[in-house]
Image: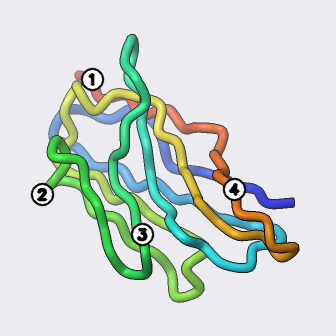
Amino acid sequence: QVQLVESGGGLVQPGGSLRLSCVASGSVFSINAMGWYRQGPGKQRELVAQFFSGANINYAEAVKGRFTISRDNAKTTVYLQMNSLKPEDTAVYYCHADLTSAWGARSNYWGQGTQVTVSS
């Protein structure tokens, strides 16, 4: 069984920083894409940043220059460093992975979500 476990959300003032972490554990054979989505109040879930097809990275336009995605050498942990946070960044942030399990099944996996609130 594969699990994605997130940590690092919280309350921060505008202009502040937070770092999110996500660990993929269990029977993981390979990771095709891994990154972060978010869903703000009354909004659809949207891509924030992700690694795909190796070392390629996608960022949403709204976070370019402020957020940085990174990962560990094993590529099973991804981080999202969020700087210069704005109230509009308030959302539940979800870790996502498109991966192939040890038994050969390719599926999408989601973490439980972590709340990020940007407010003074």
What residue does disc 4 label?
107
Q: Viewed as shown, does residue 75 lie left or right of 37?
A: right
Q: CA distance from mark 4 to mark 3?
A: 14 Å
- The secondary structure type at the circle numbered 1 is loop
Work out whether mark 2 precedes mark 1 in sequence or the reverse, and give the earlier one.
Answer: 2
Q: CA distance from mark 3 to mark 1?
A: 32 Å
| Residue at image location 52% in from the left, 88% down from the top | 73
User: Of label 2 and label 3, which has the lower sequence position?
Assistant: 3
Q: Image height check: is 102 above or below 61?
A: below
- Disc on res. 65: 2
Discs 3/1, front: 3
- Disc 2 crowd rating (10 Å Cα; few below 14, some 14-19, many 20+) is few
Mark nearer the N terminus (3 vs 1): 3
Answer whether labels 3 and 1 touch (C-beta < 8 Å): no
Name the spot of residue 117 as percent of width and height, x first. 37, 28
Name the spot of residue 102 as percent of width and height, x first.
Answer: 83, 76
From the viewer's perspective, is 16 left or right of 106?
left
Amino acid type at image mark 4: Ser
Q: Residues within 10 Å of mark 1 (few under 14, many from 20)?
A: some
Determine the CA span between mark 2 and mark 1.
20 Å
User: Mark 3 Cα within 10 Å, few/some/many (few <14, many 20+)?
Assistant: some
Q: Kindly identify which residue carries mark 1.
A: 119
Asked which secondary structure carries label 2, the reply is loop
